Image (cartoon, rainbow, N blue to C red):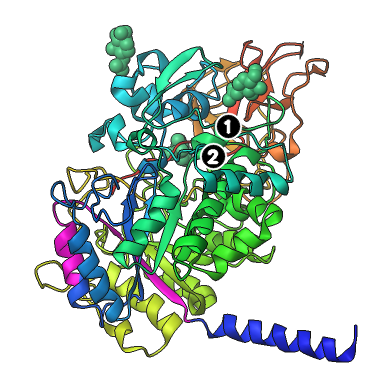
Amino acid sequence: MHLLAAYASIASALTLACSALAATPVVGGYLLLDPVDGPSKLQALAQNAATVPINRLYLSFASPTLAYVPGSNTLQYVGLNYATSGDYGFADIKTKVAALQAGGVEVFLSVGGWDYGCFPYMYTYYSIASYGATDNSNYYEITDFGGLANCTIANQWCYTCEPQSAGTTLANFAVFPEPSYSSTWQAAQKYVIATAGGDYPVFHPNLNPGLQWTDTNNSMVVTVPGDNYFSTVNRDPYQDLVYLAKDLGLAGVDIDYEEMWHADYFRNGPSEGPWTNYQTVYKYSAIMKDVLLNIAAIDPTLKLSTAAAAAGGDSSDWWGGNLKDIWYYVFKFYPDLYNGIANSGGVNIMTYDLSDNESDYECPTPTACTLSEQVQYYMNTYSANGMSAQVGYEIGTPAYPDPTHDPTHQLPLIQSELTTILSTFGANGGFFWELYKPQGAPTNVEASSVAQQICKAALGSAARCSGTIPQPGGAVVSSTSAGTAPTSISATQPTTTVNPTKTTTAVASASPTSPPSSGCTAAAWSASTAYNGGAVVSYNGHQYTAQWWSQNNVPTAGAPWTDNGACSGSGGGSAPAPGSCGSTAAWSSTTAYNSGASVVYGGYIYTAQWWTQGDTPGSNSVWTKGNACSASMRRRRLYE
Ligand SMILES: *[C@@H]1O[C@H](CO)[C@@H](O)[C@H](O)[C@H]1NC(C)=O
Ligand SMILES: *[C@@H]1O[C@H](CO)[C@@H](O)[C@H](O)[C@H]1NC(C)=O
Ligand SMILES: *[C@@H]1O[C@H](CO)[C@@H](O)[C@H](O)[C@H]1NC(C)=O
């Protein structure tokens, strides 16, 4: 390289580095709108714009099926649930946006979230019911209702998007459409196809919100969730989002894409897994590209941010049930797209709703189980690949795991964990869900305090970092009220009646590549040995004590065995630990298996009870079904 050119490139690299460093970190808070108290909350925030401890507000959620004609000044077809008549809150929001931004808080509109990306039928048949099989024994969403046969559209296929208590109907849900008639969507598709690095991209415009779709895999005709108004008027929601943002005077738009159903259904790979989920990489990338093309054409100052799954930066094999590795491949195939978002509004990682249920292998590694350790682990998957990303925090009771089914493995944001996370990531800013979410338990850090602490870590002594989140009507929740904040709203009771449950959710995959050490000292259980009461055996990384005599009775948590819990330390369990599918070979129809041999099939570990060959796991009693390879195959339940 010529010396001058080298100097020039060093200089421009320095300029780039400096401008990147100079950007003010973002302290973002989501505001979940509803017609009952959304307007008063937004009013309180707008009135206190100069002193709220955030510098970005995300209004949530608009539907991915939104339609907005430029200049029409109505939110009627936006799905925002802010108001239910007139201009549906357009003028009111526009006024509040101006006040907030004048006070130094940039306002974004977020599209998607859990409900506006949820397709109950797909979860029922392809995520929960063991990928189209009739075996759904591990999933309480279905077993609570008596099995798959009892699940219908009327009960939203047994409440796989939201629990029955949320009172939802199919009308509460939507999917992200593929508006094939739109020229910018077509351009986005071309962009995706041009540098696709995995399977060839196949788009599915026939999965059209509000219309019927035939699932040829299951010979069923189902209604795709979502309002189809936008398609009846041939509009592209990703373009209309930009028109709407411009007319509202917003600083940016945000895409919160959580379509795990899409990855589960369009997965590719051997039947026993693991799989690739390239088609979901392509769909998400096309959506983002369509938005960016429209930003460039309509309102180039508009920023674009995205929420991303905690496991999304991971590059390893995928066992279904989440959006693992999606952003890793977005970055790999479309680095300019990923970096364009990261340098615009940012990539916000939903590093919450994590669990330390080790029997389900929900810690990404056996040594990363606390909230802060898991946050560190998942953020590292992003940074190790040079992917810029921000940490996400959740106020109050986590949405996962469902406390009625697993009350002991939630990882709420308590002060010690917040302190640890901030010490590593705080200077970079972050975002939290959600501004008015109840504290849930006295030991959880309440919203104003979380916001203040993120704010101080990112913005230092900025005056707003001492402010509080204003309560509608004027009352202010003080950050010192930790012990007195409401604890009465239980995690199982939605707090509003209208559209109460939308949320962002992180779905982290337990990476099945590193089996935990077992450390069991008791002899391995054997199907052929008779055990008397009091006998202790090792099985699947746990030790069990016999309650009474038995033979050929596989140890489970129930009688005749008592589960003494997981063995810790290193050493010798003879059966593979649950979840360790990465090191357990896939079942092969031509291999002969002896009693005790373990294989992976359909995302589960199976153990042979006696010699077998050619018997497909799950279809023959010689195989005992064990844990799922990835706990994250379990569906998330959301309580907001
Ligand atoms: C499931 O359906 C069967 C047959 O209709 C019914 O008897 C049973 O009560 C249902 N189970 C539940 C839990 O609803
Ligand atoms: C649907 O059927 C196709 C063709 O048989 C198959 O390749 C694919 O794996 C099936 N998908 C699911 C989710 O079962
Ligand atoms: C968590 O672990 C327990 C065993 O400790 C298990 O029985 C339970 O099903 C798990 N919970 C969830 C929600 O998966």
Q: Are marks 1 and 2 in contact (CB under 8 Å)?
A: yes
Q: Give the image location of residue 542, x and y in percent.
A: 59, 38
Q: Nearer the viewer, residue 145 or 309?
A: 309
Q: Nearer the viewer, residue 610 or 470?
A: 470
Image quadrant where residue 376 sits = bottom right
Frontmost of labels 1 and 2 is 2
Amino acid, disc 1: Asn
- List x then y, in percent, for residue 222: 41, 20
> Label 1: how many residues lie within 10 Å, few (<14), some (14-19) or many (20+)?
many
Residue 590 within the magenta-colored segment of the rendering: no
Which quadrant of the rendered structure holds the N terminus?
A: bottom right
Instruction: Residue 174: give x, y in percent of width and height.
Output: 37, 37
Q: Secondary structure at mark 2?
A: helix
In the rendered image, the vertical position of residue 368 relative to residue 448, given as above or below: above
Name, please, the residue furthest toward the left. 473
Q: Looking at the image, is 315 positioned above or below residue 526? A: below
Q: Is residue 25 magenta?
A: yes
Residue 546, given in percent of the width and then of the height, sits at 53, 26
Q: Residue at coordinates 16% horizontally, 68% vertically from top-left? A: 43
Q: Which mark is residue 631?
A: 2
- For the point 32% across and 39% down, which residue is it? 404
Mark 2 Cα shell of 10 Å, populated few (<14), some (14-19), many (≥20): many
Q: Which residue is mark 1?
A: 627
